[in-house]
Amino acid sequence: MTTLTEEWESSASLAWGSLPSSVEDVQALETLLSQPRPEIVEALRRLDGDLMILGAGGKMGPTLCLLARRAIEEGGLKKRVLAVSRFSDSKVEKTLADAGVETIACDLMDRDSLWALPAIRNIIYMVGHKFGTTGQESKTWAINAFLSGLVAQRFGDARILAFSSGNVYPFTSVVQGHCTEETPPDPVGEYAQSVLARERIMAYFAQQTGAPVLFLRLNYAVELRYGVLLDIAQKVWTGAPIDLRMGHANVIWQGDANAFALRALHLASSPPSVLNVTGPETLSVRALAVTFGKLLGRTPRLEGIEEPEALLSSAERAFTLLGYPYVPVGKVIEWTADWVSRGKDVYDKPTKFQVRDGHF
């Protein structure tokens, strides 16, 4: 008799044809992350108008743009994908342009540049500032809160999906129900507070124009170059201590998170609505460390005791509306261990998921 998890993993493998046993290099990784599925093609087919991604040069933006562009091409759709970013990394801009994505170099904090952007029907807003918040609080609030109001004013006729964070929720019991969209926000620290402010300010201006908006509260996206799983795997590999106080976490494969974003655009509403996006599992940091230890041939250094509460979200509403993620976390763990053992490229941007006081 198979378990629900086994059935889910089996259906995911069938849907993808066959998930690879390992990911060879960055090119193979980005191809995997931007692999379109029929549901994504159909979602974009039903979507009226073109798509513009603001803040497209970050960790998730490039593969989201590529996923949208590949789905449009696979469906034979006549839609544009525009990527807006400062593009401090020219390689990212070239990769997108070569794939048929229209790139626009723009500092969104410059009002004239923001208003000069083309009027596009569908907007995915990915701009945010997290790491380095401590000591740069004013910059954090300006980017995370003030800018969202400007964007809502500029694109008052657009449908907007804005990335938010599960950090806006309070800590919740590890063994009981996790935070749903109905859980009252109670953000810890200035980063999380400024993210909630992003939602509140954008909602205010969107309600003035009647623009449909959806806030996608993500918690946490992972791929092989960054994320909670990589953080733990690297510490196991190098022998660095692993803090167990934030003893549990939710994660979701970045390709699935991007797929949820594209498929959830039609859920934007006026007044604005909220959708949690994460994986279905509550993952134990201790168990992850032990698993990576076995895969990497290392003994993890565990420190501290798990607290009874952690930053955990429930994505049941997303699963009901859009289905479950396609890539099982067990496969991502295997890929991550293999990636780390071969010394492949990483972003060197720790998630700091273990932080409990909100200071990033």
Image: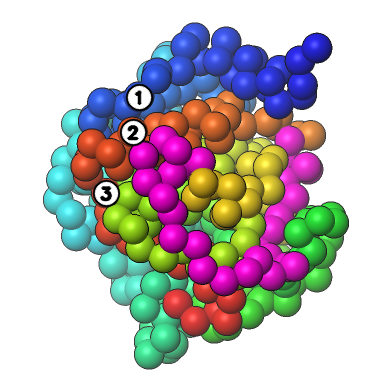
**In front: label 3 or label 1:** 1
Residue at the disc numbered 2: 338
x and y percentages locating residue 271 in the rendered image: 76, 59
x and y percentages locating residue 348 in the rendered image: 28, 58
Residue 244 located within the stretch drawn in magenta: no
Residue shown at 80%/12% (left/top)? 1
**In front: label 2 or label 3:** 2
x and y percentages locating residue 172 in the rendered image: 76, 66
Residue type beneath disc 1: Ser
Magenta span of residues = 291-319
Residue shown at 46%/48% (left/top)? 229
259 versus 196 height, above or below = above
- Label 2 vs 3, first from the N-terminus: 2
Q: Which mark is residue 22?
A: 1
Residue shown at 63%/15% (left/top)? 10
Residue 107 visible in the current orientation: yes
Contact between labelled residues 3 and 2, with CB atoms less than 8 Å apart = no
Relative to the observer, which residue lies in front, 190 or 213?
190
Residue 204 visible in the current orientation: no
Contact between labelled residues 1 and 2, with CB atoms less than 8 Å apart = yes
User: SS at mark 3?
Assistant: loop
Q: Which mark is residue 193?
A: none
Residue type beneath disc 3: Val
User: SS at mark 1?
Assistant: loop
User: SS at mark 2?
Assistant: helix
Residue type beneath disc 2: Asp
Q: Which class describes the residues within 10 Å of circle 1: few (<14), some (14-19), or many (20+)? A: some
**In front: label 2 or label 1:** 2
- Label 2 vs 1, first from the N-terminus: 1
Residue at the disc numbered 3: 346
Q: So how many labels did they put on this image? A: 3
Q: CA distance from mark 3 to mark 1?
A: 16 Å
